[in-house]
Amino acid sequence: MPLTDTAIRKAKPAEKPYKLTDEKGLFLLVGVKPGALYWRMKYRFAGKEKLLALGVYPEVPLKTARQKRDEARRLLDAGISVALASDCNPGTCNSSSMPFMIALAVREMRMTPAEA
């Protein structure tokens, strides 16, 4: 069942961090300190399981976290590593970050990866 904003607001810290799962790999990691709520996305790339940090709740609300998850999934579907995409900022990318530059161009032109 998808996560709701009410469930997020009711989340309380515990002795150990725990997860509130949403869907399609998105979850909220509830830390041991009050207010420690971290958006994470679990995914697989090149046969390996990976974890992507999407932000901190409430700065990143549920709707925005889902949009970031969907964008990351689009990059993964196009065969582009979201780890490269999140590590590179426009203007500071080098040749090893070329897949990210392609992803930016695709996103900016609103093209499907097949059209790129």
Image (spheres, rainbow, N blue to C red):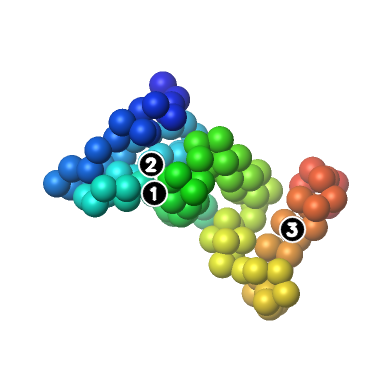
Q: Is residue 84 above or below residue 60?
A: below
Residue 103 visible in the current orientation = yes
Q: Which residue: 29% across, 35% down?
A: 11
Q: How far is the residue under mark 3 from the one under mark 1?
A: 25 Å
Residue 33 image position (x, y, % from top left): 24, 51
- Mark 2 or 3, closer to the camera: 2
The dot on residue 38 is: 1
Residue occupying image coordinates x 26% and y 48%? 34
Q: CA distance from mark 2 to mark 1?
A: 5 Å
Towards the viewer: 39 or 46: 39
Q: Amino acid at mark 2?
A: Leu
Disc 3 is placed on an element classified as helix
Q: Which residue is mark 2?
A: 28
Seen from the viewer's position, the closer of residues 51 and 78 is: 51
| Dot 1 amino acid type | Tyr
Determine the residue positioned at 80% across, 57% down: 105
Indicate the position of residue 54 as horizontal and vertical percent values: 49, 51
Q: Position of residue 19 (x, y in %)?
A: 31, 39
The local crowd at label 1, few if under 14, some if 14 to 19, many if 20 or more residues have their Cα within 10 Å, is some
Q: Which mark is residue 104?
A: 3
| Residue neighbourhood size for the residue with mark 2, other residues' Cα within 10 Å, grouped as few (<14), some (14–19), many (≥20) | many
Q: Quadrant of the N terminus?
A: top left
State how far apart marks 2 and 3 are (Cα): 27 Å
Snapshot quadrant of residue 114: top right
